[in-house]
Image (cartoon, helix red, strand yellow):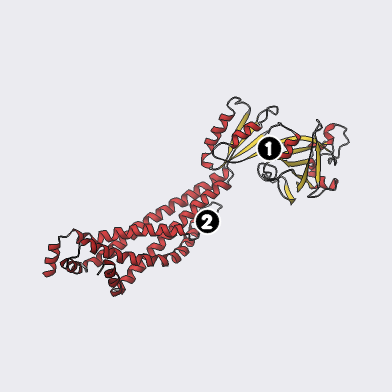
């Protein structure tokens, strides 16, 4: 009879021992699985937070006459570790099919102009991000916007414009470009401005456009600021060093500042959770190994006679070891099913306890994945193998003749 057949017969015959081992393995497996799930969810959240914290290096010109060129922007975009860039520029233009909002009777040229701001992503690095302006209709300018503008609602009302209408711009050099209104904004501070404020300086005449439209009006104009977003906030200083090398020939041209406040606020509690979960996993594995080893050692004491009989009929110590391993692994594999259900519940309870003790404003999405089950099988297998070898050590070490003589005695 093969070792696995003997293992099945033993488990069937010793139902109480099998059930006890099953419940112990379910409990240990549940704790291991719950910590694995939280650890994976925490690592996933860390990666997600790194992407969403918008850690960046802001490159800003020191002199308005020396702007950041398209060639320098191209070099920046090719740097390793850059996730995205947000180019920003500013100038003033005339309107070909509208009039600026003004309360001044000045005949100066600036009272006939509007101010245009260009962005790749208007929602970030702008007055909207600072919540000084807010969108009341339509959308922001984003990297996919082509020939789009966001205008003040009072400016739109004055010129009888709405979302979907087209505005035409004209520079002092006679260059023209048109763009479609994609959004309307409002500040709340429009009425607080002086009546003598020239049109070009009034917030009603602030028009935000994409960089494609801006470059049509001002070819090779350059940018006064470029926000460079990092893929990994932890490598922000390295990114700043790489950016410095791009402007090495004119070091006084730009200034650079890093911004990763949100990441720093979330990093500490997140790493604290990872350390706690790692400690829980280590303690669970050690405790589980010790408990199962003690349990199997108690059983092996009562199976010395059985081992001696097997040896007397010619079975090897290896076959005896394989039988015990088969018994333990058979119960362990079945226990994994129960551990999956209980472990999910325990993981959610532990998640709430861990997050309640932290100050970070983030959530962990705990859900059972196939990789978690594989990890449980691997860790559980190591625990079972160690426990079986330790419990079988007296039998494996003993001389077969001594074992048989003790049996006869």
Cα–Cα span, label 1 and label 2: 35 Å
Q: Picture coordinates of residue 220 (x, y %)?
A: 70, 31
Identify whether 2 is placed above or below 219.
below
Q: Dividing the picture into quarters, in which one does residue 211 lie?
A: top right
Please indicate, yes or no, whether residue 188 appears anywhere in the rendered image. no
State the residue at coordinates (38%, 62%): 28
Q: Which disc, if any, is residue 198?
A: none
Horizontally, residue 355 falls left or right of residue 192, namely: left
Q: Which residue is mark 2?
A: 364
Residue placed most toward the observer, 73 or 160: 73
Query: Where is the N terminus found, in terms of image quarters?
Result: bottom left
Horizontally, residue 298 falls left or right of residue 43, namely: left
**Mark 1 and 2 residues: CB-CB less than 8 Å, in contact?**
no
Tag 2 secondary structure: loop
Q: Picture coordinates of residue 193 (x, y %)?
A: 80, 40
Identify whether 10 is placed above or below 103.
below
Q: Which residue is mark 1?
A: 88
Residue placed most toward the observer, 72 or 94: 72
Tag 1 secondary structure: strand
Q: Nearer the viewer, mark 1 or mark 2?
A: 1
Query: Where is the C terminus found, in terms of image quarters?
Result: bottom left
Identify the residue at the far front of this view.
Answer: 1
């Amino acid at each position: 009879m093969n070792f696995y057949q003997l293992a099945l017969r033993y488990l069937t015959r010793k139902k109480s021992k099998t059930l006890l081992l099953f419940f112990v393995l379910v409990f240990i497996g549940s704790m291991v699985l719950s910590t694995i799930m939280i650890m994976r969810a925490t690592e996933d959240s860390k990666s997600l937070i790194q992407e969403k914290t918008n850690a960046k290096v802001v490159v800003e010109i020191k002199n308005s006459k020396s702007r950041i060129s398209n060639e320098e922007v191209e070099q920046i975009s090719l740097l390793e570790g850059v996730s995205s860039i947000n180019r920003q520029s500013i100038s003033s233009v005339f309107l070909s099919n509208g009039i600026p909002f003004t309360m001044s009777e000045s005949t100066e040229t600036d009272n006939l102009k509007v101010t245009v701001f260009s962005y790749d992503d208007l929602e970030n690095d702008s007055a909207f991000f600072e919540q000084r302006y807010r969108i009341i209709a339509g959308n922001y300018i984003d990297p996919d916007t082509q020939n789009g503008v966001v205008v003040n609602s009072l400016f739109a009302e004055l010129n009888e414009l709405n979302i979907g209408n087209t505005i035409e711009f004209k520079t002092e050099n006679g260059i023209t470009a048109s763009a479609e209104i994609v959004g309307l904004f409002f500040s709340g501070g429009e009425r607080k401005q002086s009546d003598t404020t020239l049109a070009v300086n009034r917030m009603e005449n602030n028009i935000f456009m994409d960089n494609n439209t801006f470059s049509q009006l001002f070819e090779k104009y350059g940018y006064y600021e470029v926000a460079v977003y990092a893929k990994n906030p932890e490598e922000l200083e390295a990114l700043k060093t790489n950016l410095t090398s791009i402007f090495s020939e004119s070091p006084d041209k730009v200034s650079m500042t890093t911004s990763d406040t949100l990441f720093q606020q979330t990093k500490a509690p997140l790493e604290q959770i990872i350390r706690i979960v790692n400690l829980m996993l280590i303690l669970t594995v050690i405790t589980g190994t010790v408990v199962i080893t003690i349990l199997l050692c108690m059983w092996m004491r009562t199976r010395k006679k059985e081992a001696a009989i097997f040896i007397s009929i010619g079975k090897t110590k290896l076959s005896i070891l394989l039988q015990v391993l088969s018994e333990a692994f058979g119960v362990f594999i079945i226990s994994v099913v129960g551990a999956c259900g209980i472990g999910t519940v325990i993981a959610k309870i532990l998640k709430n306890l861990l997050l309640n003790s932290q100050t970070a404003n983030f959530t962990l999405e705990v859900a059972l994945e196939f990789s978690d089950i594989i990890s449980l099988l691997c860790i559980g297998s190591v625990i079972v193998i160690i426990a079986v070898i330790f419990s079988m050590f007296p039998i494996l070490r003993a001389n077969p003749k001594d074992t048989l003589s003790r049996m006869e005695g």
